[in-house]
């Protein structure tokens, strides 16, 4: 089994969700080396409480080039912060989280990464050694799921094809977006090299200019169209995460109905943060859902690693 890292970009608006994720990772997830939380520089202190011997809190600036800078905190819109450069129009925190996933996987020591958004919570044991058996990386894909009139998804597919130099996509197209996504480091490095060869730009610059991007679509279409890397992946439509993507908040009865439908394949649940589903409701319902001898997800507070131990290595040579 290759060493596997967990990667979670997050920010203060998702603090409570991230707290629940970390508690559940500490309780249920095994066979990983490190869990990297990547947060805005001015929020490192806020998230430092989650650091322990296997979890590092890293500032975004360690992974972004110097020319991409955050705007002052008061310049936000719909709780989203913005980053600017002289090279492209400003991008928001949602875009930056995509950039840092790619950058982090490229530079951390682990050859395989499992990406966890902060709105995920585990409720059953999840062994990453079983998910990455024989050195094969799972590639989540739902075949022919993206219709040409599915505005956002179709735009992400088309953008991925342009950035990777793949010509025109055919619809319905495959969808590589999901929760609990695995990436191979060599494939990510090759993907960014391909983007730079096609666009003649630094890959972050190219993604800023493209604007309509999905990191998971990019990775999926890159791997699918490279036979060497595809051999190192196992395409699968199965997911260990039971996902809710709608924009309406779930109340406790609705959460109970969803969790009661969780078959044995599911080890985690995600209600997209934009749904506005109450974190406290999720906590309470999951507490009831667990086995009788484990009535609550809330674990002991994580120890804090001193700042000098978190920041003594520069992960990214900024340009």
Image (cartoon, rainbow, N blue to C red):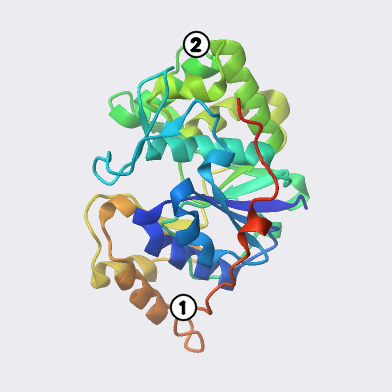
What residue sits 73% from the left and 26% below the top?
Answer: 228
Which numbered disc flags the more N-terminal residue, 2 or 1? 2
Q: Is residue 1 visible?
A: yes
Residue 260 spot, x, y in % from top left:
37, 71
Please tell me whether mark 2 or mark 1 is closer to you in this view: 1
CA distance for labels 2 and 1:
49 Å
Query: Looking at the picture, does residue 145 appear above or below residue 123?
Result: above
What residue sits 51% from the left and 70% below the top?
Answer: 23
Reading the image, the residue beneath label 2 is: 167
Residue 26 spot, x, y in % from top left:
58, 70
Residue 90 spot, x, y in % from top left:
35, 26
Residue nearest the observer in this picture, 300 or 231:
300
Q: Residues within 10 Å of mark 1 (few under 14, many from 20)?
A: some
Query: Looking at the picture, does residue 129 appear above or below residue 290?
Result: above
Reading the image, the residue beneath label 1 is: 298
- Placement of the C terminus among the 4 image quadrants: top right
Residue 217 spot, x, y in % from top left:
48, 31
Image quarter of residue 86:
top left
Residue nearest the observer in this picture, 311 or 81:
311
Q: Are marks 2 and 1 in contact (CB under 8 Å)?
A: no
Residue nearest the observer in this picture, 224 or 212:
212
227 relative position to 290: left or right: right
Q: Tag 2, which secondary structure? A: loop
Residue nearest the observer in this picture, 136 or 78:
78
Image quarter of residue 127:
bottom right
What residue sits 42% from the left and 23% below the top?
Answer: 85
Residue 70, which numbered label?
none
Q: Tag 1, which secondary structure? A: loop
What residue sits 49% from the left and 70% below the top?
Answer: 123
Query: Looking at the picture, does residue 39 appear above or below residue 156?
Result: below
């Amino acid at each position: 089994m290759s060493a596997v890292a967990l990667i979670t970009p997050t920010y203060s608006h998702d603090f409570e969700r991230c707290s629940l994720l970390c508690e559940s990772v500490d309780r249920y997830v095994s066979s990983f080396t490190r869990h990297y939380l990547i947060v805005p520089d001015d929020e490192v202190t806020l998230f430092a409480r989650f650091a322990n011997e296997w979890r590092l809190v890293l500032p975004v600036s360690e992974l972004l080039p110097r020319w991409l800078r955050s705007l002052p905190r008061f310049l936000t819109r719909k709780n989203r912060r913005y980053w600017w450069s002289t090279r492209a129009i400003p991008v928001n925190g949602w875009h930056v989280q995509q950039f840092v996933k790619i950058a982090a996987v490229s530079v951390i020591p682990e050859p395989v990464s499992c990406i966890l958004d902060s709105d995920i919570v585990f409720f059953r044991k999840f062994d990453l050694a079983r998910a990455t058996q024989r050195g094969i990386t799972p590639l989540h894909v739902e075949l022919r799921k993206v219709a040409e009139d599915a505005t956002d998804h179709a735009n992400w597919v088309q953008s991925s094809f342009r950035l990777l130099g793949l010509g025109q996509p055919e619809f319905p197209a495959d969808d590589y977006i999901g929760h609990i996504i695995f990436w191979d480091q060599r494939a990510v490095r090759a993907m960014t090299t391909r983007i730079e060869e096609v666009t003649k730009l630094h890959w972050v610059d190219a993604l800023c200019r493209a604007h309509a991007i999905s990191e998971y679509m990019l990775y999926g279409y890159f791997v699918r169209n490279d036979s060497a890397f595809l051999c190192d992946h196992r395409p699968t439509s199965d997911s260990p995460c039971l996902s809710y993507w709608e924009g309406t908040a779930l109340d406790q009865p609705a959460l109970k109905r969803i969790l009661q439908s969780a078959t044995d394949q599911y080890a985690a649940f995600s209600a997209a943060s934009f749904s506005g589903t109450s974190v406290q409701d999720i906590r309470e319902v999951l507490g009831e859902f667990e086995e009788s001898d484990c009535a609550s997800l809330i674990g002991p507070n994580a120890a804090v690693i001193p700042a000098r131990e978190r920041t003594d290595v520069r992960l990214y040579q900024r340009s």
